[in-house]
Amino acid sequence: MDILIRPETPADLPAVREVIDLAFPDKDVAGLAEALRGSAEYIPELALVALCDGAVIGHIMFTTSYIDDGDESIPALTLGPLAVQPVRQRQGVGSQLVEHGLSASRRLGHRIVVLIGHPTYYPRFGFVQAGPLGIEVPLAMSEEGQMVLALTPGALDGVRGLVRFSPVVYDA
């Protein structure tokens, strides 16, 4: 299966919503993605679609966030949502989106990525549990799902604190 990954365009948005709705049928994750898209934390170069035969089959978004330690706010990215059409899951589409997004994040000069996600999926990309490092990721259902990744060596050295997402996340 040939996959093309590129930044989303306005023409992709209905298909992106459909993919997210199919991937998360019991939650309004598509509404969260739309709210993030309208926020100051949206980074157009890091909202990506996966295409197969010209059709959107997957989507990933990275938005601006911060790790607040009480004295300073350390810039970070939040990965999410990540969605792949259910019929295309377990075929490497999500992995390609994550790898492409992390590579683009590095190229753009970002140093840290946080996420709330499945604790057995994201370690393959280098993510580790945030809690043992002293980083708290709010809104996570479990401590194991609070994860962080240093995009550059040493980026997490001395970083501790509470992740602050886009304000729209707290309203979702």
Image: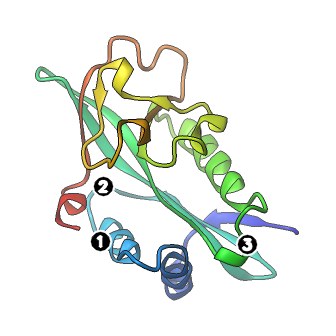
Toward the left, the furthest residue is: 70
Quarter residue 11 falls in: bottom right
Amino acid type of the residue tagged 2 in the rendering = Glu
Q: Is residue 45 visible?
A: yes
At x 50% / y 88%, what residue is drawn?
14
Q: Do the residues labelled 3 and 2 touch (CB within 8 Å)?
A: no
Answer with left or right where residue 119 lies relative to residue 4.
left
Residue 18: percent from left, percent from top: 53, 85
Q: Quadrant of the N terminus?
A: bottom right
Residue 76: percent from left, percent from top: 36, 37
Task: Say how the picture is coloured.
Answer: rainbow
**For the residues carrying marks 3 and 2, which lies nearer the camera in this image?**
3
Residue 170: percent from left, percent from top: 19, 58
At x 65% / y 64%, what residue is drawn?
6
**Taking 32 as reference, is 101 above or below it?**
above
Q: Tell me the crowding category of disc 3: few under 14, some 14 to 19, or many 20 or more residues within 10 angstroms, Cα based.
A: few
- The residue that label 2 is drawn on is 41
Amino acid type of the residue tagged 3 in the rendering = Arg
Answer with left or right where residue 35 lies relative to residue 68.
right
Nearest to N terminus: mark 3 or mark 1 = 1
**For the residues carrying marks 3 and 1, which lies nearer the camera in this image?**
3
**Taking 47 as reference, is 108 above or below it?**
above
How far apart marks 3 and 2 lie (CA) works out to 29 Å
How far apart marks 1 and 2 lie (CA) works out to 10 Å
How far apart marks 3 and 1 lie (CA) works out to 25 Å
- The residue that label 1 is drawn on is 35
- The residue that label 3 is drawn on is 88
Nearest to N terminus: mark 3 or mark 2 = 2
Quarter residue 129 falls in: top left
* Label 3: which secondary element: helix
Q: Tell me the crowding category of disc 1: few under 14, some 14 to 19, or many 20 or more residues within 10 angstroms, Cα based.
A: some
